[in-house]
Image: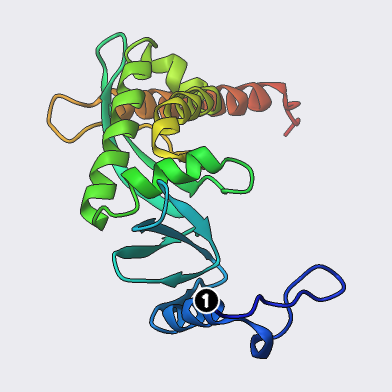
Amino acid sequence: MASRSQASPGGGHRSIAHLNSDSRQRIGYNCRGIYISASSSEYLVKTGAGVKDMKWGRTFWRFAGQNVASVDMKPRNIAFNLHSISKDLVPFDVPVTFTIQVHDPHTDEAGFLRYAQRINNLTEAEYYTILTGIIHGQTRILAGTLDVMEIFNGRDAFRMKVQQAIEKELIPFGCSVINANISELRDMPGEDNKYFESLKAKAISAATQEARCHCSLRSADRPVQAG
């Protein structure tokens, strides 16, 4: 019968040399595994044999029947040209950029594990399809409740509402929007889509007319010099 392992005065086990035969078997089993560590911008997620659901950490031993996947925590940008229609049926294009961040497991473990389960194993194309679909859908829904000039003149307010709507949709996927940029609205391609071009032309015409009026008034105010 193997002797029991001896404990140190502090309550923990001594060095490997003092471990019993059962412990040496466990160490041998560990040596048959693969030690995996994460980079500074990653966490690891372990699943499979002997693991209940999922475990996350910076380092793991991986044994037969187990899988260890890395989760990249660096923010990712999604940028594209959004096509939408306002409440008053004005079609428009707007370039948008959203920065997406995975939830940190230290502050939202459940959210992080949802991301690891539902998003982390997707291809880049699949990830992009899901995220752009959410952004497209929420932006179009919100744009359909506002007149085009409300969006045009209140772009910051529109951006905040869009970001909040997208945040709610991203909760099941364990990620969030940490930055959103919505550029100036512009006409969609096509001969019939000249709304913003007309607005620009009217603004230029009004500014030119105002400048001419100022020049005329200044000329009229000048004293007439005697010859």
Decide: few, some or many residues near mark 1? Use Cα within 10 Å; few <14, some 14-19, many ≥20.
few
- Quarter of the figure with the N terminus: bottom right
Give the percent coordinates (x, y) of residue 4: 66, 75
Whether residue 75 is visible to the viewer of this picture, yes or no, is: no
Position in image of residue 57 (x %, y %): 54, 61
Scheme of colours in the image: rainbow
- Look at 23% across and 43% down and name the residue there: 129
- Left or right of 149, for residue 80: left
Residue 173: % across, % down: 39, 38
Q: How many marks?
A: 1
Q: Residue furthest bottom?
A: 17
Quadrant, the C terminus: top right
Q: Is residue 67 above or below residue 189?
A: below
Q: Secondary structure at mark 1?
A: helix
Determine the residue positioned at 53% across, 45% down: 103
Q: Is residue 32 above or below residue 225?
A: below
Identity, as a three-letter code, of the amino acid under mark 1: Asp
Most foreground residue, 23 or 219: 23
Relative to 52, does residue 110 appear above or below in the rendering? above
Check the image and name the residue furthest to the left. 191
Residue at the far front in the pictured view? 1
Residue furthest right in the image: 9
Q: Nearer the viewer, residue 102 or 224?
A: 102
Left or right: 23, with 81 as reference point: right
Name the residue at 27% across, 48% down: 128
Residue that badge 1 annotates = 22
> Is residue 43 among what the camera can see?
yes
Q: Quadrant of residue 82?
A: top left
Please identify the quarter of the rendering in which residue 20 is found: bottom right
Please tell me whether residue 197 is drawn above or below residue 2 in the rendered image.
Answer: above
Q: Quadrant of residue 121?
A: bottom left
